[in-house]
Image: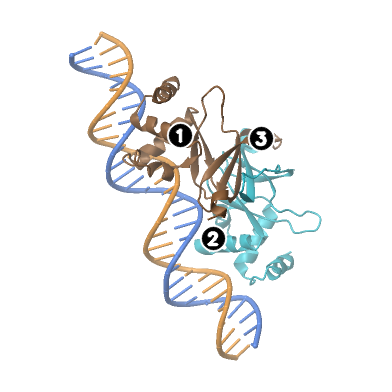
Chain colours: A cyan, B brown, C orange, D blue
Amino acid sequence: MIGNINQLLDNAGLRKTKGRETILQLLHTQNRPLSHQEIISRKSISKYDRVTIYRILETLQKVGLLHKILGSDGVWRFCTHKYTKRKKCGGNHIHFFCSECNQMSCMPEQSLPWINPPKGAKIISKQLVVHGVCANCLNF
Amino acid sequence: MIGNINQLLDNAGLRKTKGRETILQLLHTQNRPLSHQEIISRKSISKYDRVTIYRILETLQKVGLLHKILGSDGVWRFCTHKYTKRKKCGGNHIHFFCSECNQMSCMPEQSLPWINPPKGAKIISKQLVVHGVCANCLNF
DNA sequence: TTATAAATGCAACTATGTTGCGCAACTTAG
DNA sequence: CTAAGTTGCGCAACATAGTTGCATTTATAA
């Protein structure tokens, strides 16, 4: 797995550092978008500087190894693209945000609708965030 | 028009204050979602305290006179519901966010798709924000 | 192994938004 | 009309997410 992740960094033309590996590893196993806060509060990552984490997330996202989604609390969440052949994920799906536990999850079955751009405008990306209360929180 | 707006406040059970009237008036004439910053930089509003504006926006939104949308910059935008009989708007449409001029606009023709909620979850609201570059900014 | 380019750590800063509290203004009961 | 209660406003302080500049360290290529 780590080998796999190192290869990802390599393919992206990025240096392999412990921080990047750990973050990619974490996000990959979590399989849901995590905020900077959620990431840095992990034991394996808390030793790194805040700024370093921000920069790692930005870097990984720029080369396409992560995608990011804005929660209804105004905080960005980061999620790995799946990179197996079977399950490829460009982040191009709907996300659910629970305002009780502040956790975001993916709804990969439902993809985003086609959007007719405003006249003369160029569309770069689109985000559909569904805000509500997750099953866990509904049952306390 | 002002009469109309006063009536709105009245119907909502809110006191009629100059600040609320002015903000409602502004948002109504703009017809696109404005950020706190865009609102307070208007001459007619800049005399009010930051916090007062935040509170007015929150209040108006709670009673349903405004709806709010999060831009791709993490900043909330506020927009009046249309209240004429002909054009009613619950904010239930797609929004476009230009990352050049940071302006948000409504795409009222296109409504949000039906979403199948995650198992056991309760959906409260949904926001589809399309991020790109508007016609104006594309032509410099 | 060493030079260099990139990554990290640290401090300071910016911006959005919130909270607490005193005062002012409006509303309503008498 | 006045007093009392409620609501809104202004100010100061705070909280949190995210950014920038610069010195130091580390990964990589020669």
Which residue bears the numbered disc 1?
A: B29
Amino acid type, residue under disc 1 in the picture: Thr
| D27 or C25: nearer the viewer | C25
Between marks 2 and 3, how big is the CA–CA gap? Answer: 31 Å
Measuring from the top left, give residue A88's x and y in whole percent: 76, 55
Residues indicated by labels 2 and 1 sit on the same polypeptide chain: no
Between marks 3 and 1, how big is the CA–CA gap? Answer: 38 Å
Image position of D25 (left or right of B113) = left
Query: Answer yes or no: do the residues labelled 3 and 1 have beta carbons within 8 Å?
Result: no
Quadrant where the N terminus of chain A lies? bottom right
Q: Where residue A54 is drawn, which disc sits there?
A: 2
Earlier along the polypeptide chain: callout 3 or callout 1? 1
Residues indicated by labels 2 and 3 sit on the same polypeptide chain: no
Q: Where residue A22 is drawn, which disc sits there?
A: none
Which residue bears the numbered disc 3?
A: B121
Chain letter for the residue marked with disc 3 in the picture:
B
Amino acid type, residue under disc 3 in the picture: Ala
Q: Secondary structure at mark 1?
A: helix
Measuring from the top left, give residue A68's x and y in whole percent: 61, 53
Q: How many marks?
A: 3
Q: Is residue B38 above or below residue D9?
A: below
Q: Residue C30 falls in which quadrant of the image? A: top left
Image position of A131 (left or right of B52) = right
What residue sits 54% from the left and 40% below the top? B69
Measuring from the top left, give residue B24's x and y in whole percent: 43, 31
| D16 or A73: nearer the viewer | A73
Q: Secondary structure at mark 3?
A: loop
Amino acid type, residue under disc 2 in the picture: Tyr
Viewer-side label of 3, 1 = 1
Between marks 2 and 1, how big is the CA–CA gap? Answer: 39 Å
Crowd band around label 1 with a 10 angstrom C-alpha radius: few (<14), some (14–19), many (20+): few
